[in-house]
Image (cartoon, rainbow, N blue to C red):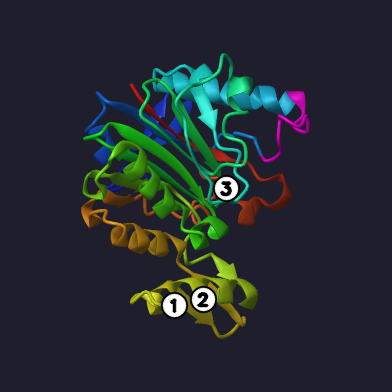
Amino acid sequence: MDLSNENIIHKKDKGFEYLQFRKLNQYSNLISHAYSLGININFRTSRINGILPEEEFLKTINNYKKLCKCLNLDYENIVKTEQRHTDNVKIVNLKKDSFEDNLEIAKETDALITNKKDIILSTTNADCILMIVFDPIKKVIANIHSGWRGTIKRISVKTIEKMKETYGCNPRDIICCICPSIRKCHFEVDEDVYKMFYNEFKDLEEIENIIEKNLNKGKWNIDTVLINKIILRDAGLLEKNIVDSKLCSVCNKEYIHSFRVEKEGYGLETALISLI
């Protein structure tokens, strides 16, 4: 099966499969990027605290190595978000000497920004939204992990604001690519979560398209991707520069890890972006 569409290309290279965004490939002389398919980047628990078993850690390192080889990148330059569903955004100016040391850089962080070449920003997901971001004018990149909690906290907009404050980025120049994630068709929540979303986003004109009640189940389906598109647009991004993969992780569970499908033993995909 080929997952390519008008926004993404499904690539197969060196035994690995991954997605790239067509719009970002226009800048292949400036950046390298990918969203993995079917591999497992297992950082559900913290290696730093000694919880992740050595065997699982080595498998993760090997998967990172193979994917980075496809992109002509050095995995030792990866800096990865710890991902605690915060709205913490961090500027990365320096990397440390090894992959394991780099894990310390992004503790308690869900979004990373840099303007330094060769630093690889990494996030992981299994239904949550990942967004890879590029300003081709200021040559700044970002990588955002926005689960439903991060979406309520508007971490995507806070990342754009930090790019403006730190590097003088103009939102009209910024490209934001939305990786595969759970979509409205499968993101079903109970009343407590529905109320959190409604209270935060009730003033959006598109609220009726964002939240839909399932009368048969007494639950609500929420379009977190649409929310991020709207709040990024309201933050100044051009609609043509908000590029959606249009892929649901649950609908494409044969290729993409999904917590809602796999449950306790779920795997994780990764999104990478680096200035070269």
> In the rendered image, is residue 190 in sight?
no
Under mark 3, the amino acid is: Ala
* Residue 136 image position (x, y, % from top left): 24, 35
- Please report whichever mark, 3 or 1, sits nearer to the chain's N-terminal start: 3
Q: Residue at x 29, y 52 (%)?
A: 242
Q: In this rendering, is residue 58 above or below 106?
A: above
Label number found at residue 199: 2
Where does the C terminus fall, quadrant-wise?
top left
Disc 3 secondary structure class:
loop
Q: Is residue 24 left or right of residue 93?
A: left
Label number found at residue 126: 3
Residue at which label 1 appears: 202
In the current view of this chain or complex, which residue is farthest to the bottom? 215
Pointer 2 with pointer 1, Cβ within 8 A = yes
Q: Is residue 104 left or right of residue 19?
A: right
- Foreground disc of the pair 2, 3: 2
Q: Residue at x 22, y 33 (%)?
A: 26
**Magenta stretch: residue 138 in it?**
no
> In the rendered image, is residue 149 in sight?
yes
Under mark 1, the amino acid is: Lys
Q: Nearer the viewer, residue 54 or 70?
A: 54
Disc 1 secondary structure class:
loop
